[in-house]
Amino acid sequence: TKPIVGVESDKTSEPTTRSPTESPSISYVPTISFMPTLNPTSSPTSNPTSFPTKIQSDVPSQMPSLTPPVKSTFLVPYERMTNSTTHNLTAVEAVLKEDDKSLLEYLSADEALLDEPFEVESVVSQVIDGNDAGVCFDSTYLCYTINTNVNVTRYPVTYSTNRSELIVLSSVLDFMEERDISIVPLVSVPDDVESILSIVFGGVPAKEMNEVEVEAFEATTFDFLFDNLGQMSSPVLVEEVTFLSQSLSQPNTDDESSSAESEEEAGDTELTVNFVVSGEYLPPPEINFDEVLVEVFDEEGQDDYLEVLLASDNEYFNEAPDLDIVDVRV
């Protein structure tokens, strides 16, 4: 072996002294390594910089997000009919107070928002110019102008102002309708939209989804569309995804002799699923809902949707490791 630089190679040689010296001993010669070390160095090669690095880190940051939740108040003005022909502001305010409690519970119980960064903090309704009540709705009963203020905490990245306004307005109007409260909105109201969407899946088992799997498909697709359509420039509030039909096909089957073999191979089977997507949005601008739906399922959107399906508890798609989307059409 080659001798270490600075040390005699003769193993029988005696050290020159057995007494400690005042100078430190050099026991090794440092070498240059191009492999990263797992241990921090006590002598960094450069001083810390205040400029951010251009290299992304796989380690999550311990620093708080730069987009913290914000508190917003959304106003819903309307005229509301009373059941009285005489002016009684105290009674009207008492009714509004009870309705605000019920509306808060109604908004807080929205299943689509339970796990989302959107929380309704309070609801406060006020009579505007209580001394100016008048007859409305072609009846003899008095009407009051009401401002319902809905205070929410939201993350502005996923719940923009437009999306939050749509959710609040739609929910307040639904609440009034379900409780037969007669109002005339003093703002633009959402427009209903509905389309039938067909998705052709490839790489699926040679069978159709059963009832439980269909329900899981509806729920997963609803969540996906609720998030993605809600974050568009003209947000759409998805209200329902309803399964219509499904059909199997095997496009790679050339003759009857190969039919039995193809039925056993999931990769040769395609499943077409037809379902209705219904919701509402707040114009302007006007939108073409068919085009909007197809846009959601662009190349990146398809990858995201497949990832959601494969991560769901749907046994049908758990049996399809090579799942892909062949076509999307309305």
Image (spheres, rainbow, N blue to C red):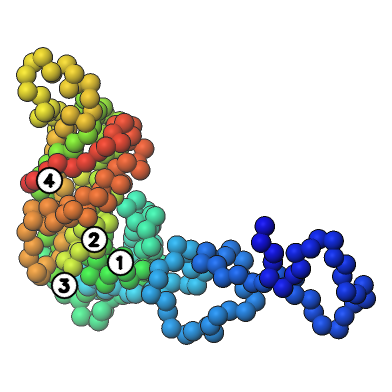
Q: Residue at x 16, y 72 (%)?
A: 186
Q: Hey, what amino acid is under mark 3?
A: Leu
Q: Earlier in the sequence, mark 1 or mark 3?
A: 1
Q: Earlier in the sequence, mark 3 or mark 2?
A: 3
Q: Earlier in the sequence, mark 2 or mark 4?
A: 2
Q: Residue at x 51, y 67 (%)?
A: 34
Instruction: Say few, some or many: other residues with alpha carbon within 10 Å of mark 1 (under 14 / 14 to 19 / 20 or more).
Output: many
Residue placed furthest toward the top: 257
Q: Which residue is mark 3?
A: 186
Name which quarter of the figure residue 114 lies in: bottom left
310 to the left or right of 292:
right
Task: Tell me whether circle 3 and circle 2 mark residues in contact (CB < 8 Å).
Answer: no
Task: Tell me whether circle 2 and circle 1 mark residues in contact (CB < 8 Å).
Answer: yes
250 to the left or right of 219:
left
Q: Hey, what amino acid is under mark 2?
A: Gly
State how far apart marks 2 and 4 are (Cα).
20 Å
Circle 1 SS class: loop
Q: Which mark is on residue 328?
A: 4
